Image: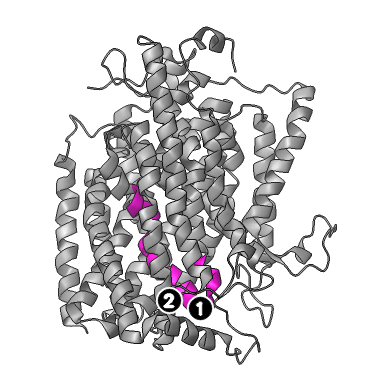
Amino acid sequence: MQWTEFGVFTALFVLVSVLGFVATRWRRAASMDHLDEWGLGGRRFGSWITWFLVGGDLYTAYTFVAVPALVFGAGAMGFFALPYTVVLYPLVLLPLLRMWSVSKVHGYVTPADYVRGRYDSALLATLVAITGIVATMPYIALQLAGLEAVLRTMGLNGGGIAGHAPLFVAFLVLALYTYHSGLRAPALIAFVKDLLIYVVILVAVFYLPTRIGGWGSIIDESAAVLSQPDPRTGQASGSVLLGEHNQLQYATLALGSALALFLYPHSLTGILASSGRGVIRRNMIALPAYSFLLGMLALLGYAALATGVEPIVNGATGEPDSNTIVPVLFDRMFADWFAGLAYAAIGIGALVPAAIMSIAAANLWTRNIYKEHLRPGASAADEARQARLASLVVKFGAVLSIVFIDPQFSIDMQLIGGVIILQTLPAVAVGLYTRWPHRWALVAGWTVGMAWGLWQLYLIPKDPVTGRGHFGGSAMRLGEFNLFGWEPLPDVATQIYVGAVALALNLLVVVLLTPLFGRLGLSPGTDHTREGDYLATGRPASGHTGGGAADGGPGDSERWAPSTRT
Amino acid sequence: MSDRDGERAGRTPRHERSPWNLLLLVPLLMLVTPLWNHDEPRLFGLPMFYWSQFLFVPLGVVCVALVVRAANRRERAAEQDAPSGGER
């Protein structure tokens, strides 16, 4: 048991828990009984808060332990996280501005709300909502895995169910203050988390190489370790440069991940909570600071390789947990109090996104399933109450999946999550620019992309030597592309990201079926949004923040605008 | 979209369209891996693969910042042209 580390960790954990509870008083609303208040912090967050909140949301604890672990295991391929988070902002700048504006005007809280208003299709909106919830759940579970990696490194590495007790306590506290304070809690905690992360990473990246002999020798030694043939496969486990067959995979994985990120409901929650278009613009310029950090963190995977770090064996599963390599590296290279600080940064780093994700999933449940299908007459207060309860259910579901199901299950699910959330791109992101796609064509495209993507992931063996198991990765060889027996590229060994191919099929179906459905005379539905809505600045002409309900199309004001509040 | 747009066209300037936006495509060069998938030259001991990708971070920031600056200018100009309209 590492008492100094544990002491520092606990002190900081208690500090942020207190912050989480008092957050409800911060920029206090007259009432928390409205989803805009509990679930979006009143849509009033300025540039700084949004920077910390979205930064804490996108660059999660799991990212901070898993990306170095990927580099530790495979080398250059794991570095895809950097291009992913660099091409991200130029791609999403303009669509996010449109999304913010149209959501402000119509009071949309979730991407599915938007799809409902744009395409007038409850089915399509429900599909988008379910996709969002299914993709987010394992993401929350993975935050737990990140937190647990830290707890186990500190010595809380018990076996069996009891071994998960520290995790359970941490999440109980998180669940309570999220229930209490809503989105304000992670927003306030994100300040502490990010300051800690910045200090820890900058010290690590500049101090560690001086201890180990500079980046040149770290890379060379890592290259030597990675090139040793694996005794089972006879192949090198990785390399410090990309090889012949994985360059396309690297690029498509980075691009696919970038396109997927803001389709995740929790990312959008952070954006919709901001107070204006200027806030989003400034953040698209300032957020890459985190990308720089992430890139440096990825390099720590090599520092771990070069110093011969061995991952800790998880006391519950009996298997080595590669997510522990960064915590172990810190434990080995730094004084105990500093390692404790680093663990607190990772641990708190898990709480911020887990809170936002559970809020986003709860919003989806409440707005697009509960209110749409179960209780259409729900009042604003009903919605807020339902969302708070749903956030508890979501978090305990995540804890249970870690405790009772193998954590590997969450990792597989997360892999699937990226592929399936991409299938909402035609309805959500393309929809921001054109109403051309027919709503039924979008449903068909979603179905095809989803079915093909899941099937393809299922076919990828977990164990490449024996070919056994499923969901072993997200890379397929182009030669394996098979469409009902048609194999256009039979012998090509180049690899590609499954999600990118599934999305291409999805879009193809949308493009082919839209004119067909139009000709068949299927109703395209009423578009409740107008071009001007996508450019709205949200500054009310009359000084009232009702969200422009009076401007909405016929029927809009009853169904889609938030009820009046003060 | 609907015919209502016609009425509004005078009031809502099209803030978004601008050749400046093409700058947003420049960071996508980062996805062309053969450009920088090399060991030499090294910088601070890091192979080109790593340091060149780090350089794309400021490049991306500059591109987005230029697009945002151009958009802010357009919006300010639009507001001056139509002091009563232009936003809602």
Q: Is residue A299 above or below residue A120?
A: below
**Location of mark 1 (residue):** A73
Q: Residue at x 64, y 64 (%)?
A: B34
State the image quarter where residue A171 is shown.
Answer: bottom left
How far from the left and from the top, in percent, is residue A149?
35, 74
Asked if marks 1 and 2 touch (Cβ < 8 Å), the reply is yes
The numbered dot on residue A301 is 2
**Label 2 crowd (10 A; few <14 / some 14-19 / many >=20):** many
Q: Is residue A472 visible?
A: yes
Q: Is residue A483 magenta?
A: no
Looking at the rendered image, the quarter that the N terminus of chain A falls into is bottom left
Left or right: A85, with B30 as reference point: left
Left or right: A30, with A533 as reference point: left
Query: Closer to us: mark 1 or mark 2?
Result: 2
Give the structural element (helix, strand or loop) at label 1.
helix
Q: Residue furthest front?
A: B41
Find the distance from the CA under tag 1 to the CA under tag 2.
8 Å
Q: Main secondary structure of the magenta part?
A: helix
Q: Is residue A99 above or below residue A540?
A: below
How far from the left and from the top, in percent, is residue A12?
17, 64
- Pick the residue in front: A220 or A551: A220
Residue stretch rendered in magenta on the structure: A54-79
The chain containing the residue under callout 2 comes to A
Q: Is residue A60 magenta?
A: yes
Q: Is residue A27 above or below residue A310?
A: above
Q: Residue at x 59, y 19 (%)?
A: A526
Task: Give, as a three-letter code, the residue at label 1.
Answer: Gly
